[in-house]
Amino acid sequence: MISKEVKGSSGKAYFVIPEDADDLLILRRIIEKGDYIIADTTRVIKQTKEYTRPDKGERIKVRVSIMVENISLDDVVDRLRIAGSITNSNNELVSRGTHHSLTVQVGDTITIDKDRRWHDIEVSLLKKSGNNSTFVLVAIDAQEGAVAKVSGTHLKIIPNIYSGHSGKRYQQSVKNNPTTEIFFGEVIKTIASIWNTFTEEQDSNKRMIIFGPGETKRRFYNLLVGKHQFERDKVLVIDGVDVAGEDGIFVFLRSSAIKESMSFSKLATVSSILDKVMALVHRGEIKYSIGIREVSYAASMKAIEYVVFSDAIFKTIDENDIIKLLNSVESYGAKTFAVDSSTDIGLRVSSLGGIVALLRYAISYKVIDE
């Protein structure tokens, strides 16, 4: 999240740009009913003339300020919907007091004015979301390659790119083959479409990890940092993942290699938390909570150290209840992580009731079972 206090607002207003789905969730937790949101949007203006029917109207771009009446995540966490009454606009044809709905997506710019000084927890949430590292994963061999972007705990995979090599020609056709050069070129174009879109803030935290069976990955790396001049210190080649294509991406995210090569990423942190929870389950130590009832009870005891939840939980639990729970645990120092239910880690969390917590100390759940 790119965020900056509005000059002269005395801590009442912040300018923000969400950079990934996690940031939209952060905004959902920060924005409240009664806040003012300033954003660029479009609105249909209908011209009415005497003795004529009103026309269909023209959709124009306009900057509005609305007082928030309702806020919700749309399609889980891909978009944020904010509805309220218009309090001001830069176009006299847009009437004040009329209802309007804003859709906030990744990359949109908004200003949040709370008409009061922001609480420490709200400012902390903004700053916390600004430390995301972004990874580009490349799973490649002589026959196929796949590229994926990992931002926070969210995964986006580009479909497989195929070289056209048959299995029988695998050994003899990789080197000095024009088909291989074309194949490598297509993969590099795909990488560049992601790599070159990062903002200045993201640029220092971006990394690329290349893996796959055989030596193809190293030839690809040499071409990438040699001829195409990608930054050598931001590109890593790893061994131990002998699968290419989309399957290779998922194998990597389940392997121990993720903890070594992405040790400072959110995804690796979440993977480590889940491994600790599973170890506690096997040892019979009740220093964990699984499911909304247990996590809510642990939160009331202020026993939580980490919470991991899948975005799928919003389909079964009221959104406002989840937001209150997350804000509650962060208010006393616990850390929360959202995971994408389309990833292997997200599926693991979803299978455990959609939410899991690692506790500071063991507690008994007999009270909520009775």
Image (spheres, rainbow, N blue to C red):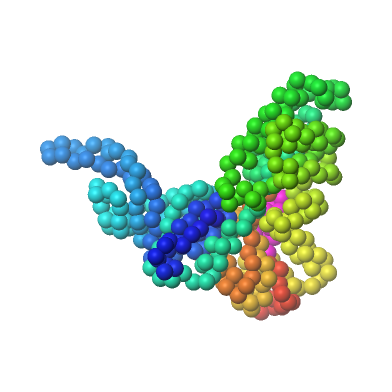
Whether residue 209 is visible:
no
Q: Quadrant of the N terminus?
A: bottom right
Question: Left or right: 55 with respect to 163?
Answer: left
Give coordinates of residue 91: x percent, y percent.
27, 48
Q: What type of secondary structure mainly makes up the magenta span?
A: helix
Question: Left or right: 43 with respect to 187?
Answer: left
Name the one closer to the observer, 169 or 14: 14
- Asked which quadrant contains residue 171, the reply is top right
Question: Left or right: 183 with respect to 168?
Answer: left
Residue 353 sits inside the magenta stretch: yes
Whether residue 90 is visible:
yes
Question: Residue at position x 63%, y 55% from top?
Answer: 132
Question: Residue at position x 27%, y 56% from top?
Answer: 96
Question: Residue at position x 46%, y 69% from top?
Answer: 118
Give coordinates of residue 168: x percent, y percent.
86, 23
Name the one closer to the observer, 342 or 192: 192
Magenta stretch: give its range. 344-356
Name the one closer to the observer, 359 or 212: 212
Name the one closer to the observer, 321 or 212: 212
Give coordinates of residue 188: x percent, y percent.
68, 33
